[in-house]
Amino acid sequence: MLASTPKPPYYAVIFTSLKSENNKGYDEMANKMMKLASEQDGFLGVETAKENIGITVSYWRDLESIRIWKENEQHTVARSKGKSLWYSSFTTRIALVEKEYSFIKY
């Protein structure tokens, strides 16, 4: 499902990843992080695609909201486990969304 975001500007956090062979506990933690992020002040929505490369784009009101999410204690634990267990590599990018174009077919 596509995220319903407000009129720009807002921020996108783009997380791309390659998973390692060890996926024990990954799905549970990913679901927990999605729920927790959605409860954070400033969270606007999320879109994710998982094939060979995982891509998750979360949308945020401002940089302060992103900083607070990054510093969340449970999110810090999840990032640590991601580095040590679940990912062989990943990159996080933060971008300012200045324009948005949409097409919705009903």
Image (cartoon, rainbow, N blue to C red):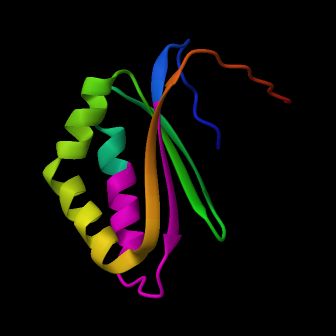
Left or right, 77 with respect to 29, comes to left
Viewer-closest of 5 and 101:
101
Which residue occupies 61% across, 65% down?
A: 53
Left or right, 55 with respect to 22, comes to right
The residue most toward the right is 105
25 w.r.t. 66: above or below: below
Q: Which residues are magenta?
A: 12-34
Q: Quadrant location of the C terminus?
A: top right
Q: Can you give x and y, in whole percent of width and height, for residue 46 in the image? A: 50, 41
Which residue occupies 63% across, 15% down?
A: 99
10 w.r.t. 33: above or below: above
How many discs mark residues in the rendered view? 0
Indicate yes or no whether the magenta region holds residue 97. Answer: no
Which residue occupies 25% across, 40% down?
A: 69
Q: Can you give x and y, in whole percent of width and height, for residue 7 in the image? A: 56, 12
Q: Can you give x and y, in whole percent of width and height, for residue 105 in the image? A: 85, 30
Is residue 41 something one can see in this rendering?
no
Q: Quadrant location of the N terminus?
A: top right
Is residue 49 something one can see in this rendering?
yes
User: Which of the 4 image quarters holds residue 61?
Assistant: top left
Indicate yes or no whether the magenta region holds residue 23. Answer: yes
90 w.r.t. 26: above or below: above
Which residue occupies 54% across, 13% down?
A: 8
User: Which of the 4 image quarters holds residue 29?
Assistant: bottom left
